[in-house]
Image: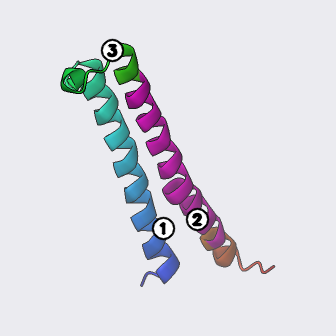
Amino acid sequence: MRTNLEVIARILGFSTIFGVVLVLIWLGLYLTGFICSFQMFDLTPHECGVITYGGIGLMKLLVYTFFLLPWLAIRLEIRRQKNGRSL
């Protein structure tokens, strides 16, 4: 039977993978020119790139902060509990 920490770690792991895949899809769509339809907003290609890369950077920061780092901390705690060590 799985503990609550293992379930949470699994959810955070899948969320991390989903976030990274989402960032890669976003970058791929931008590089293929699919997203750069900002002409209707009267933006230059440079402004389009700045907005897109800024959004990708923010998304990566959020994925690492809210999914990857807690997943690592929980995995370390699970390992510590299995080894029988205490603080």
Q: Residue furthest front?
A: 42
Q: Is residue 76 left or right of residue 16?
A: right
Q: Are marks 1 and 2 in contact (CB under 8 Å)?
A: yes
Circle 3 Cα neighbour tier, 10 Å, few/some/many (<14 / 14–19 / ≥20):
few
Q: With respect to residue 11, does 28 lie above or below?
A: above
Q: Does residue 9 show up magenta in the picture?
A: no
Q: Earlier in the sequence, mark 3 or mark 2?
A: 3
- Quadrant containing the C terminus is bottom right
Q: Which residues are magenta?
A: 50-77
Q: Earlier in the sequence, mark 3 or mark 1?
A: 1
- The residue that mark 2 highlights is 75
Q: Nearer the viewer, residue 41 or 11?
A: 41
- The residue that mark 1 highlights is 9
Which residue type does callout 2 highlight?
Arg
Residue appearing at x 46%, y 33% in the figure = 54
Q: Earlier in the sequence, mark 1 or mark 2?
A: 1
Say the numbered circle drawn on residue 45. 3
Q: Quadrant of residue 70?
A: bottom right
Residue appearing at x 39%, y 57% in the figure = 15
Q: Nearer the viewer, residue 23 or 56?
A: 56
Q: With respect to residue 9, does 87 lie above or below?
A: below
